[in-house]
Image (cartoon, grey):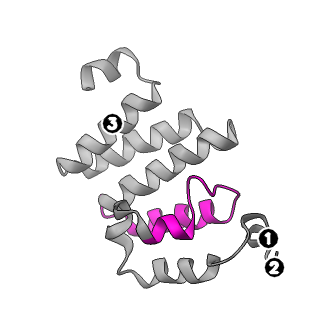
Amino acid sequence: MEAELAKNPGVIGNLQQVAWVDVCLGRNEEAIAAARRASEVMSVARDAYFGAYTLAGLAEVEAHAGAKGEALELVGQLLAMPAGEVMSVARLKLDPVWDPLRGDPRFQLLLKKYAGAHPIAAANGTSP
């Protein structure tokens, strides 16, 4: 993967795969750097749809790398925008990728804050 990434450093799929390999090997700083690079290559500002996926990928890697505060910040950001396919309260409750955050009171607060909230209304602080 590293050789492929060296040949094509801007390929999002390669960056995401390297991030997960690194986090599984305990190379947390390298994992976060690769996931962050993917989120920069395909940012929400560049592409609101696909950028949400790379941002969620960064949050997942951060959660598994022990950067819970950063991961929770991104989860909150994603919940506040219309990213229901990528990030939703239901997905956060069910997807085992979020297990590292489940015991954190901040994670539980995010679930409560956005439970039943319409994404656009939640971002505006209003009810649907």
Label 3 – label 1 distance at C-alpha: 34 Å
Instruction: State the extent of the magenta-drawn residues as a range.
Output: 65-93
Q: Residue under label 1, please give it.
A: 121
Seen from this angle, which residue lies furthest top?
7
Task: Tell which circle, 3 or 1, labels the residue nearer the N-terminal end.
Answer: 3
Q: Amino acid at mark 1?
A: Ala
Q: Is 43 above or below relative to 70?
A: above
Q: Position of residue 125 (x, y in %)?
A: 79, 76
Left or right of 34? Residue 51 is: right
| Label 1 neighbour load within 10 Å: few <14, some 14-19, many 20+ | some
Q: Quadrant of the N terminus?
A: top left
Q: Residue under label 3, please give it.
A: 17
Task: Tell which circle, 2 or 1, labels the residue nearer the N-terminal end.
Answer: 1
Q: Amino acid at mark 3?
A: Gln
Q: Amino acid at mark 2?
A: Ser
Task: Tell which circle, 2 or 3, labels the residue nearer the N-terminal end.
Answer: 3
Q: Residue under label 2, please give it.
A: 127
Q: Name the residue at 67% across, 65% down.
A: 80
Asked whether the beta carbons under mark 2 and mark 1 sit within 8 Å of each other, the answer is: yes
Let me know if residue 35 is in the magenta part. no
The nearer-to-camera label among 3 and 1 is: 1
Q: Name the residue at 25% across, 49% down.
A: 23
